Amino acid sequence: ALRAQKHYQRPETTPARQSSHSPSNQPSPHHDTDACVMTMTLPQQQPVLRRASRPPLFLSQRHRHLVPFVLLILGAIALVALNSSPSSSSDPAHDKARNSATTEVSDADEHPWWWIGLLKQLDGKDVDTVTSTLTEYAHGKTAYDTPSDFLEACKGGELPNEGRCGFIGGPDEKFSSMAPHVMEVLIALGMQPSSRVLEVGAGLGRNSKSLIAYLDKGKYCGIEPNADMLAAGAAHLIGESIIAEKRPRFSTNAEFDFGSFDEIFDVVTSRSVWTHTSKGQIEQYLASFAKHSSPESFLATSVVAVTEDCSKDYNGTTWVGKSHDQDGKGVVVHCMPWLREACKKERLVVRSLKEDTPSLVKRQGWNDLGQPWVVIRHDINA
């Protein structure tokens, strides 16, 4: 202040200062000094305020033209990183097989009519819990006499969830004819009403209904990981009355473990299961059959083709196609030489149905409905 007074004090005779700062028309050095201080302070503070409010460097007018180039570079880096990331499968044969099987996702069946909500509820539950839950769900539901009646009701919108039929386990044109075909094959191979039968891949029960009705009470067991699909089939296709009379039992395990039923089975069967499995899953299936069957038992399953050519074999490690935990399409091939070696490890032998029971295949009008059968038995010479 003293420095300002020394250098900037205005003369007392200045009229503007007298009229502005001294109402009594007397000059006021204090007022003049304060005015000088303000005029000195404001110019010093203004640049500081401008520097503090300056925008970030990359948003300044001088650098805004660089923003598109920066974004372009970042996008290129992200694209390179995405293309160079490792695939979910390190097995090229696996990827090739899955691509050739056209395992694209279909959202047409995102919410089929059988979507009930039991999948997580029954995951990992024991046979008694699964069976009782299915029995309770089937109570009071409308069951149809034949697969064709069921399919007509499904397509006609008479079932839950807005009548959406969705995936039913195979083509519509084969749905009604599949159960008679399966029954014909199994009876020709030796199944009797007293046989203890395990069906792996029961699905909606298109074959289960006929099997349960044919077998004696308590002789049928079924495995189906998709608990929702299984419950819907139990209610609307198998039916509450058949379940109450024949007492079938069910499991939802997806590991091809037959031990949960605590049974020695005479017959094990699957339709359109090995057409989707990996080699590791088939080996697990064979091990369970060998362990939970008798020397006179047999296993009958369908395959894509009975072939000696292994060049088109699926060597991946996962299921291909629709299942309880994925949605897709595709079938896979496993050649007979590989199947023979896999069976040999478990002291089993595999033959085509034509080799095992030629009289059936030579029957007039025989039709395998698009998937030939192989029959696996215990090797009595091993």
Image: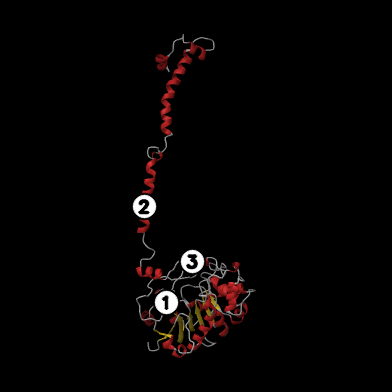
> Can residue 75 be seen?
yes
Q: Secondary structure at mark 3?
A: loop
Q: CA distance from mark 3 to mark 2?
A: 31 Å
* Residue 210 image position (x, y, % from top left): 56, 82
Q: Is residue 319 above or below residue 54?
A: below
129 displayed left or right of 53: right
Q: What kind of residue is marked 2?
A: Ala
Q: Which mark is residue 282?
A: 1
Q: Secondary structure at mark 2?
A: helix
Q: Secondary structure at mark 1?
A: helix
Q: CA distance from mark 3 to mark 1?
A: 26 Å
* Residue 270 image position (x, y, % from top left): 48, 79
Q: Quadrant of residue 79?
A: bottom left
Q: Is residue 33 above or below residue 74?
A: above
**In this view of the protein, which residue sits in the foreground, 266 or 276?**
276
Q: Residue furthest bottom?
A: 359
Seen at 37% across and 46% down, the residue is: 70
Q: What kind of residue is marked 1?
A: Ile
Q: Nearer the viewer, mark 3 or mark 1?
A: 3
Read off the residue under disc 3.
106
73 displayed left or right of 188: left
Which coloring applies here? secondary structure
Mark 3 or 1, nearer chain start: 3
Q: Which mark is residue 76?
A: 2
* Residue 229 image position (x, y, % from top left): 54, 72
